[in-house]
């Protein structure tokens, strides 16, 4: 008997008893929909976090150091970072955080502070249209390369800006919009703690959707700290490594250098780490989450599968005479097995498809109402859910199908 | 020799006090082209006989040679093939599958034979044409009268052109007029070369067969040739 015939027969049998078929499928429908929704939402959340990491760039090592005696170790650490060599490191920048008031016309970073209160709109989503105060960083000419920024307008910071204490800055896209609206920021002077700094460039936007945008920044040459925050030393660096392997190697070298400087933590505190590690552990956490939650939801699938087995057993009993007739006119045992297996698999497959449809809607709803995200179930999850349901059908169809095929033709024909 | 059984026993609950010998040492030979009626009262073992001859059941003891093949040595799969290709069954209760249409019922043995869709349809239609039901192929069995259902069953039995037709009380559920039609159809098949084995409890029907084998308590008590007056 050909598979196409068997498929037709199974479909006819399922359609011939629609009410019961739907009830039987219910378990599978609910199971597939819930597993799919949970796995999709957890996955979607993880994707969102990973996207933010990606915007920051991979193989990015943060180095920080502070000495308990207040000794300025800036140059020492900067030199060491630069000495790691081109094989390991493709960029090094100081990455100090400046605290200052930035003013342009009526725009004032101090005043923007107040907007934090209104950050959440009434439905709980984070507003991205607010003017929040920008983050101010000290950097070198390699700041953009280390932090995955691209110049969109004007020019980047240059080596000379640093060397010659130029009063210039480069703005992130969001910061530029907050201060200048649609006007061209290039050549305008920002007042930073009362000193004028000329805007020479604007970075392309790379993180438009996240609430704490990485684009809401202003970067100054690190030598400007003499003016903006005198006496405050810069003790953080960002090192861009050449590859994943280079990241690990550079981190271990940096950490042993820091251990040497701080006397293994006696005279100070230093650490080098990369977001690669964060990303890995985030991924692991998300995988764990979907396993645990998906596993719990999978129990409902199991229950659904047992329901299928039950009904198939009833079906076999009800159709004993039909089985007898089929055997009498020449059906082999294997044909009977195929027939009932395909029927169970098809029942579950159709249930799976309905479950996927409901799961997709549930994923979208959960995403929007609960975690405020725009989540679609991935193709692999959808395909996986479908295969899972068909496999469940086959698994739980085996016993009833085997039972059907074991019937002796003579006895089966005698059944009423 | 088409069918040859020798010292065949079918015993239920052997060794128990309640042991039943449905067939008690039966030997019988049937030639190709014969029309044999197996007649007996209920409980005489005639249905068991038909099950054994039709490869639906295996005897407890004894040999059964079908066209020279020892049936007892065949696997379940090989028995299925024999039922499919060698034997056409006609039952008292028609045994049509209710969820399938007339055409699909008749196509069923051809499906199990692996005949392709186009040829299958053609063969099934030809069989339905012979029983005069070519116009009702889309109907379900429940929508038809008993006589029509039995004709569908006959069409299903002859669709694969099997050399042997086995009919178990084929007229039992029909009125005498329709019953006669069925009998005449079987005679016609026999005249075209099919071997027909007719199981019945009705002496009148048995009298229309060329050969009559009478069973009683699992034993053959009479086996005689008869003059017949077929149309």
Image (cartoon, coloured by chain):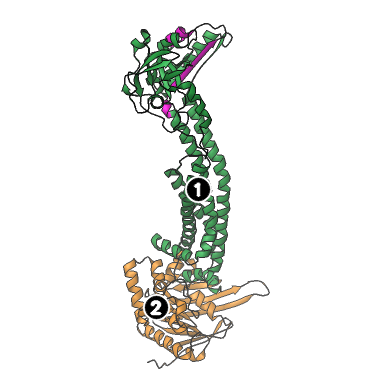
**Tag in front: 1 or 2:** 1
Mark 1 Cα shell of 10 Å, populated few (<14), some (14-19), many (≥20): many
SS state under label 2: helix
Q: Residue at x 46, y 51 (%)?
A: A357
Is residue B112 or residue A113 the one in the foreground?
A113
Where residue A205 appears, as percent x and y from the top left, is 38, 28
Q: Is A339 above or below relative to A107? A: below
Q: How far apart are marks 1 and 2 (CA)?
A: 53 Å
- Whether the magenta-drawn stretch holds residue A223 is answered as no
Q: Specify whether disc 1 shares its chain with disc 2.
A: no
Where residue B39 appears, as percent x and y from the top left, is 52, 86
B124 relative position to B46: left or right: left
Direction right: furthest residue:
B17
Mark 1 sits on what residue?
Answer: A362
Mark 2 sits on what residue?
Answer: B155
Mark 2 Cα shell of 10 Å, populated few (<14), some (14-19), many (≥20): many
Q: Which residue is drawn at 46% across and 35% down?
A: A47
SS state under label 1: helix
Colour orange belongs to chain: B
Q: Is residue B1 visible?
A: no
Q: Mark 2 lies on which chain?
A: B
Image colour for chain A is: green
Q: Is residue A259 visible?
A: yes
Where residue B160 appears, as percent x and y from the top left, is 37, 73
Image quarter where the C terminus of chain A lies is bottom right
Image quarter where the N terminus of chain A lies is bottom left
Q: Give the residues drawn in magenta, as a range.
A: A54-80
- Badges 1 and 2: C-beta atoms under 8 Å apart? no
């Amino acid at each position: 008997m050909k598979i196409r015939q068997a498929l037709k027969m199974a479909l006819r049998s399922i359609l011939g008893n629609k009410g019961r078929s739907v009830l039987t499928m219910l378990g599978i429908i609910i199971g597939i929909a819930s597993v799919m929704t949970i796995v999709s939402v957890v996955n979607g959340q993880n994707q969102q976090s990973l996207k933010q990491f990606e915007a920051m760039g991979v193989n990015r090592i943060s180095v920080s150091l502070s000495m308990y005696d207040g000794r300025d170790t800036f140059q020492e650490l900067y030199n060491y970072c630069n000495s790691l060599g081109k094989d390991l490191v493709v960029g090094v920048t100081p990455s100090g955080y400046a605290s200052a008031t930035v003013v342009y016309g009526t725009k004032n970073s101090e005043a923007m502070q107040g907007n934090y209160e209104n950050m959440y709109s009434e439905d709980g989503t984070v507003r991205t249209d607010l003017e929040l105060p920008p983050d101010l960083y000290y950097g070198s000419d390699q700041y953009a390369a280390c932090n995955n920024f691209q110049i969109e307008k004007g020019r980047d910071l240059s080596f000379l800006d640093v060397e010659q204490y130029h009063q210039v800055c480069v703005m992130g896209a969001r910061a530029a919009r907050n201060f200048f609206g649609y006007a061209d920021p290039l050549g305008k002077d920002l007042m930073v703690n009362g000193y004028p700094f000329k805007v020479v460039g604007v970075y392309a936007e790379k993180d438009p959707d996240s609430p704490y945008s990485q684009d809401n920044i202003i970067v100054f040459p690190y030598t400007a700290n003499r003016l903006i925050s005198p006496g405050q030393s810069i003790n953080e660096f960002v090192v861009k490594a050449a590859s994943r392997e280079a990241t690990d190697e550079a981190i271990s070298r940096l950490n042993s250098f820091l251990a040497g400087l701080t006397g293994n933590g006696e005279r100070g505190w230093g650490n080098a780490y990369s977001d690669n590690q964060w990303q890995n552990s985030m991924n692991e956490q998300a995988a764990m989450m979907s396993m645990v939650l998906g596993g719990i939801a999978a129990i409902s699938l199991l229950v659904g599968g047992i329901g299928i087995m039950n009904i198939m057993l009833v079906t076999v009993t009800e159709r004993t005479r039909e089985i007898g007739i089929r055997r009498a006119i020449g059906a082999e045992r294997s044909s009977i097995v195929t027939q009932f297996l395909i029927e169970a698999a098809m029942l579950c497959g159709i249930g799976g498809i309905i479950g996927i449809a409901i799961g997709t809607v549930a994923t979208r709803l959960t995403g929007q109402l609960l975690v405020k995200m725009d989540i679609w179930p991935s193709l692999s999850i959808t395909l996986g859910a479908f295969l899972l349901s068909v496999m469940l059908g086959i698994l739980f169809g085996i016993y009833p199908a085997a039972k059907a095929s074991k019937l002796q033709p003579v006895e089966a024909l005698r059944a009423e | 020799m088409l069918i040859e059984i020798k010292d065949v026993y079918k015993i239920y609950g052997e060794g128990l006090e309640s042991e039943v010998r449905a067939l008690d040492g039966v030997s019988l030979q049937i030639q190709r082209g014969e029309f044999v009626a197996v007649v007996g009262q209920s409980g005489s073992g005639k249905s068991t006989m038909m099950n054994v001859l039709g490869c639906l059941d295996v005897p407890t003891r004894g040999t059964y040679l079908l066209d020279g093949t020892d049936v007892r040595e065949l696997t379940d799969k090989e028995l299925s093939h024999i039922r499919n290709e060698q034997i056409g069954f006609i039952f008292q209760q028609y045994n049509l599958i209710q969820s399938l249409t007339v055409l699909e019922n008749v196509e069923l043995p051809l499906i199990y034979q692996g005949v392709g869709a186009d040829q299958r349809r053609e063969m099934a239609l030809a069989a339905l044409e012979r029983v005069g039901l070519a116009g009702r192929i889309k109907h379900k069995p429940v929508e038809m009268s008993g006589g029509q259902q039995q004709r569908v069953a006959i069409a299903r039995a002859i669709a694969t052109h099997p050399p042997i037709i086995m009919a178990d009380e084929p007229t039992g559920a029909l009125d005498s007029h329709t019953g006669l039609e069925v009998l005449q159809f079987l005679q016609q098949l026999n005249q075209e070369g099919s071997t027909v084995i007719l199981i019945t409890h009705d002496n009148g029907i048995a009298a229309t067969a060329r050969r009559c084998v009478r069973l009683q308590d699992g034993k053959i008590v009479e086996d005689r040739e008869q003059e017949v007056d077929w149309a």
